Image (cartoon, rainbow, N blue to C red):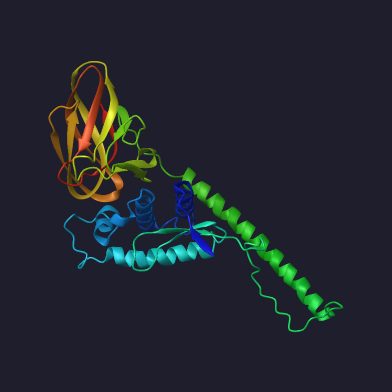
Amino acid sequence: MAIMTSSSTEKRAALEEVLQSTTFLRADQLRKFLRYICEMEIEGRGSELCEFIIGVEAFGRPSDYSTAEDSVVRRRAVDLREKLHEVYSTELAAAKVRIDLPKGSYVPRFVQVEPAKNGLELASPFPVHLDHPFPGGFPERRRISAFWFAVVFFALGALATSLAFLVFTSLQHARSSTPAVAPEPGVTYEAEAHANTFNGFVTPDACEECSNGVRVRRIGDGAKNYVVINDVMVSKAGNYDMVIFYLLNGNRSFFVSVNDGPAIQVPLTGTNWITPAKAIVTVSLQAGRNKIKFYNDTAYAPDLDRIVIR
């Protein structure tokens, strides 16, 4: 029997468990797809999920793309369902909370698997059928079968433990060998920093190739969706180069306002939503503390990784 869970903590833990699994390790597009729809559901915005918005937000399609001509969301949803079935049939077979993507829907369900009433959560992998009871004990032949069953079961357990250790070691090596983001001369301000202001639907999200592994998404498409980078400090007033690290597939614009001043439009072009690109603009800063707002009241803006002031 399975029941739905409403705990956001349990949901996020279940999501991270899947995203960190070896089954999903190299399925980058499916990982991004799954993270997007799960975060929307956790935030209580599952009703907003549809093929078009997923195509734009999760797959980087342009805002005027046609779902009739481009079926990427439908095709990848099939792949995602198969991948979820695979991971819960293998390495996450003992997971207590599982993610399900029902057919015909893009809204994920977080299902809590209820333990069996006898307290045994995992059944024996080998069914044992007794055609005739033996009150006085098993014949010798059945005792031998039981012995070999125990041997096989123990061997499989040892093999599973060895494989788990190898997988863990491989993951640790992969993580330790991931190249660090190249430093940029100047003072760096991360878009996802806690001191910043996130308004509307703007939210930090995972980004493997971004600085600190995080970017800020859903900027723009309305006046309420913006991020303000606070506490940008300089020793004296003047003009400074601001290097903007962003992610984008296509053409979009940031509007930048320094200390609530007039907007500066920054048209940008990018080729993917994975690797940050950069652009440099000149901004006028006052001595001491400054705040820089990134927004776009009429259309979606790029995702923001960080800025560097120099």
Determine which quarter of the picture holds residue 219. top left
Q: Quadrant of the C terminus?
A: top left
**Quadrant of the rendering where the N terminus is positioned:** bottom right
For the image shown, how many numbered marks are present on the structure?
0
25 in relation to 140, above or below: above
Displayed quadrant of residue 256: top left
Specify the farthest residue to the right.
136
Where is residue 296? Give x, y as percent: 17, 41
Name the residue rendered at 24%, 26% in the picture: 291
Q: Position of residue 11 (x, y in %)?
A: 45, 51
Furthest-bottom residue in view? 132
Viewed as shown, does residue 298 lie left or right of 76?
left
Residue 118, placed above or below residue 60:
below
Q: Position of residue 119 (x, y in %)?
A: 66, 60
Is 51 situated left or right of 42 in this image? left
Q: Foreground residue, 278 or 152? A: 152
Q: Where residue 85 sits: x, y (%)?
A: 47, 66
Q: Observer-nearest residue: 49 or 252?
A: 49
